[in-house]
């Protein structure tokens, strides 16, 4: 977990009172010393084994279970249940298969918003946050294994429920796992050494901030790269599982094969998650404010974040841009996946081979982005802008398919190309968008802000699929490519907004001012609490 919030940290009087705080000017300028903005407690120093346990969890939580193949299994059963009519009654309306999938996505993301409001805001307090991840992971494991009992078309309603709950479990576990990386990065021996150099005056604050950025970028990107390599091995094993159940023999075997590979990948996730559950150091979060319990403080923290984020203008700008771009990308991936499933006729082996190409390209893409950033000392925002270009091109590709059948996600060969392009140029979004969140997040409030951004991301993912579903239903011939009009425009709008207005250096200055004011609020509350106690 991240270092304690400087505004709420309780430190022994023998320590430097500024340690863990922000740079402040002494009244006597001759006594002014630079102070690193992070606390470093030796007992919480990040170890090599802890980092590898962190990577291990992500290899297991790779999305194959509830994000990749569960949607395919769900759509496959819908298609068989609908038959030649091509429609089913869902949520009170007769809908097409693609429309049902998009509405189910919307329902799932709407529920996730409520969950993050309840559990996300107090994860920065105390030491309970790892327990939240463990409980959510167990729920995800149960859903993954549960698919073994759902592989016939008469159970499509059950599949809908499992798909919705499974997507919730997958996304929430991923958010709470991801939010741990700033704390891991800032407790590494490398950044501790940089903090000492800053305190000794041998490096500048800008150099320290860049070292902090690079360390977070390294940890996030390497996690994604190692996960991609591990996922290739898991997919290779899955191919063996599919041949073992003879998925090409019949439709029923293909259905069972999808359920079997979801359960197999879930078993791998369980094994790879255990090291992180054991080895993660339970770094203390913020202490509870006076007269508050762990439930009350969550809503108080959320209220303060919502009301005070207006003082963090750059954080708010990124929040808006993240909302727009996340909406576009999440919906784009869902729309393309539904088109891909139809074109390959739900052939599990073909889908697995295509995904193998995509994951291999993903590994190359994320590692290349990281090496380029490191080699040329580029900022996180520069790398993020490059990913935005890839997203726009992807939506443009789909939009062409509205007007012609020769290009635009209508042929099997296009999905081989798509997976390669997506892996090389778009998948780095999942790393760099999270690094960007850490860039605009005040220290010590990582889990609150990651939860807020997740709420925004889920809101956008709730709106986008519903809008796209309505566009498909309203099109004269039910053209499944028509949402790309909306998605291309949304990507261009969000790109212009983020490139033109977001400034990360200004954001760091706003965060320092914000934390200094939080320190004053904390001190005032303590003084008032102490006065009341003496009375």
Image (tube, rainbow, N blue to C red):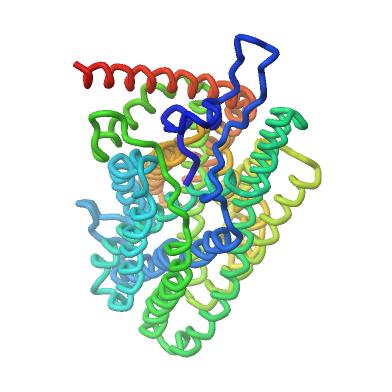
Image location of residue 268, percent across then percent down: 46, 74
Is 166 situated above or below 116?
below
Residue 408, compared with residue 253, is above or below; it is above
Compare residues 93 and 506 and report the one nearer the observer: 506
What's the residue at 41%, 75% (across, down)?
Answer: 267
Residue 449, above or below 154 = above
Name of the residue lying farthest toward the right: 376
Can the viewer see residue 405? no
- Identify the residue at horizontal 45%, vertical 60% (top origin): 338
Left/right of residue 423 with respect to residue 272 in the rendered view: right
Residue at horizontal 77 percent and vertical 40 percent from the top: 377
Q: Does residue 442 appear left or right of residue 141 in this picture?
A: right
In this view of the protein, can residue 186 be seen by the observer? yes
Left or right: residue 16 compared with residue 357: left
In depth, the one of 162 and 227 nearer the eye is: 227
- For residue 186, above or below residue 142: above
Could you tell me how many numbered marks the image carries?
A: 0
Q: Nearer the viewer, residue 1 or 149?
A: 1
């Amino acid at each position: 977990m991240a270092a304690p919030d400087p505004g709420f940290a309780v430190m022994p009087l023998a320590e430097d009172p500024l340690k863990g705080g922000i740079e402040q000017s002494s009244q006597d300028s001759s006594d002014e010393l630079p102070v690193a903005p992070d606390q470093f407690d030796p007992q919480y120093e990040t170890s090599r084994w802890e980092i590898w346990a962190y990577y291990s969890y992500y290899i297991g939580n790779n999305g194959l279970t509830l994000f990749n193949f569960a949607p395919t299994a769900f759509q496959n059963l819908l298609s068989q249940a609908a038959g030649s009519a091509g429609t089913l009654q869902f949520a009170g309306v007769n809908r097409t298969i693609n429309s049902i999938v998009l509405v189910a996505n919307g329902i799932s993301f709407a529920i996730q918003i409520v969950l993050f409001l309840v559990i996300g805001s107090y994860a920065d307090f105390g030491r309970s946050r790892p327990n939240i991840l463990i409980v959510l992971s167990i729920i995800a494991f149960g859903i993954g294994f549960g698919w073994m009992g759902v592989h016939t078309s008469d159970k499509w309603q059950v599949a809908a429920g499992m798909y919705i709950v499974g997507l919730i479990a997958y996304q929430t576990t991923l958010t709470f796992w991801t939010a741990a990386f700033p704390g891991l990065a800032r407790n590494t021996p490398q950044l501790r050494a940089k903090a000492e150099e800053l305190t000794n005056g041998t490096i500048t604050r800008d150099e320290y901030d860049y070292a902090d950025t690079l360390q977070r970028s390294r940890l996030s990107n390497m996690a994604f790269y190692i996960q991609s390599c591990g996922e290739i091995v898991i997919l290779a094993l899955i191919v063996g599982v599919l041949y073992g159940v003879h998925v090409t023999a019949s439709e029923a075997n293909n259905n069972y094969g999808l359920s079997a590979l979801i359960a197999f990948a879930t078993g791998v996730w369980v094994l790879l998650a255990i090291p992180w559950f054991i080895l993660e150091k339970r770094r203390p979060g913020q202490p509870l404010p006076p007269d508050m319990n762990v439930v009350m403080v969550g809503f108080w923290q959320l209220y303060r974040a919502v009301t005070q984020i207006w003082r963090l203008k750059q954080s708010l700008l990124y929040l808006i841009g993240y909302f727009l771009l996340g909406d576009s990308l999440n919906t784009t991936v869902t729309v393309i996946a539904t088109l891909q499933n139809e074109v390959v006729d739900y052939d599990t082996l073909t889908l697995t081979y295509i995904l193998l190409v995509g994951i291999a390209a993903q590994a190359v893409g994320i590692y290349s982005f990281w090496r380029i950033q490191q080699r040329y000392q580029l900022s996180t925002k520069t790398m993020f802008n490059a990913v935005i270009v890839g997203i726009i091109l992807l939506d443009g590709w789909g939009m062409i398919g509205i007007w012609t059948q020769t290009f635009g996600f209508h042929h099997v060969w296009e999905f081989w190309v798509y997976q390669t392009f997506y892996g090389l140029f778009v998948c780095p979004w999942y790393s760099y968008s999270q690094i960007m969140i850490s860039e605009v997040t005040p220290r010590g409030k990582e889990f609150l802000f990651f939860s807020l951004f997740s709420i925004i991301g889920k809101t956008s993912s709730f709106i986008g699929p519903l809008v796209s579903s309505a566009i498909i239903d309203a099109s004269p011939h039910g053209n499944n490519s028509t949402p790309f009009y909306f998605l291309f425009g949304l990507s261009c709008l969000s790109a212009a907004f983020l490139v033109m207005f977001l400034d990360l250096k200004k954001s760091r200055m706003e965060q320092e001012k914000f934390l200094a004011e939080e320190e004053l609020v904390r001190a005032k509350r303590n003084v008032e609490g102490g006065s009341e106690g003496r009375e």
